Amino acid sequence: MADVIANMSMSLDGFVADPQDRIDHLFGWFGNGDVEVPTAVEWATFKTSEASAKMLRDAMDNVGALIAGRHLFDITQGWGGTHPMGVPVFVVTHEAPADWPHPDAPFTFVTDGVEGAVEQAKKVAGDKNVAVASTKIAQQCLNLGLLDGIQVDLVPVLLGSGVRFFEQLEGTTTLTGPEVVEGTGVTHLSYRIKR
Amino acid sequence: MADVIANMSMSLDGFVADPQDRIDHLFGWFGNGDVEVPTAVEWATFKTSEASAKMLRDAMDNVGALIAGRHLFDITQGWGGTHPMGVPVFVVTHEAPADWPHPDAPFTFVTDGVEGAVEQAKKVAGDKNVAVASTKIAQQCLNLGLLDGIQVDLVPVLLGSGVRFFEQLEGTTTLTGPEVVEGTGVTHLSYRIKR
């Protein structure tokens, strides 16, 4: 069955974006190598170290659906209708956008909360994983016991302020792992939630 | 010359203690292995994995002085007069304790701030490193440009709340590394500050 895995690039001090939602300092590793990793879209071909490329290819092979929050959907303009992972996207929102210009794209607007999104995404993913791409959704999944794993792409920078990956968590969560992949300008750490 | 290195055991969500200053969830790796690492005190012999033991022995060989804040000094009761690292300790405080029961111990109470403590600790450490063991001191050292390295012993747990390693930082700090050592129940990440 599909695992639900939250994945973010994070600074050593725990931020996934600066206070203006910029990610320049955190996404450098997607372009600092010479191994090309094509994605589902023309506007995004990653160029990473071999180690990161292998990790990315594995991730793309194993992810069957993605859950995002409305904020991420809005700031990326819905990835133009195709997420780089090339999988169906479930957007958790209070209300579907009125003017979404890609009605045929594999985007589902889920208005009944995170649990509904996870349920729908798992169905679509089949035996592949569901990736959670927004911090608030990841936090809610954790608190609801819906998360199976956490992948942190840990970037050697201290941002000092911004949007935290982990906040509003209820109680202590024990993890196992991590599996470690040492990239260039990034350390990939893959944890499992211990139940 | 001595490098100034901040070192803490930290949860994946960035905490070095829970809201009650407890560290149970973070210090398990000091006792979860079968390789004994003696310290300078009888009450603390570490038992870790071989990988962590090697890291700890290297650290103890290379640290010549330690800087702590008054809070840490108080909650540890001044380590009974001997820090496990077996090195002179410089305690940053507004006022030296009136009733310190170990007047002959190698403890110096520094009342003229972090810069003074770093200067004195470096002199004593000679060509060895100065370890910074308190979050607030580490943060001040970072903001003052006095820090050369950061060692995070990253523990696979999310605490949800508590005392953060990194807070009150001014601006963005670029790091290099990390050197990674995979222990059991801990991932040792050693970074350098990029100047």
Image: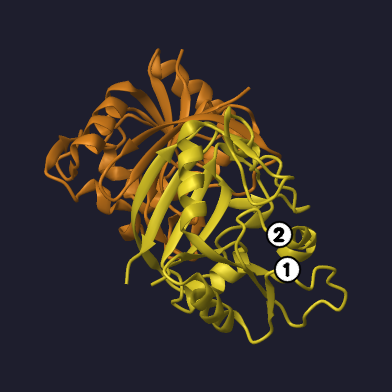
Chain colours: A yellow, B orange
Q: Mark 2 lies on which chain?
A: A
Residue that appears at 32% across and 47% down: B186
- How far across and how far down the image is residue A40, in percent? 64, 52
Circle 2: is it few (<14), some (14-19), or many (20+) Cα within 10 Å?
A: some
Picture layout, residue A111 above or below residue A2: below
As drawn, the label of residue A105 is 1
Dot 2 corresponds to which residue? A82
Residue type pointed to by label 1? Ala
B37 to the left or right of B4: left
User: Which residue reaches farthest right?
Assistant: A99
Task: Tell me which corner region of the image, top left, top right, bottom left or bottom right, holds residue A117.
Answer: bottom right
Residue that appears at 79% across and 73% down: A103
- How far across and how far down the image is residue B60, in percent? 28, 28
* Callout 2–callout 1 Cβ contact below 8 Å: yes
Q: Which of A109 and B69 is in front in this view?
A: A109
Residue type pointed to by label 2? Thr
Among numbered discs 2 and 1, the one appearing first in the sequence: 2
B33 to the left or right of A112: left
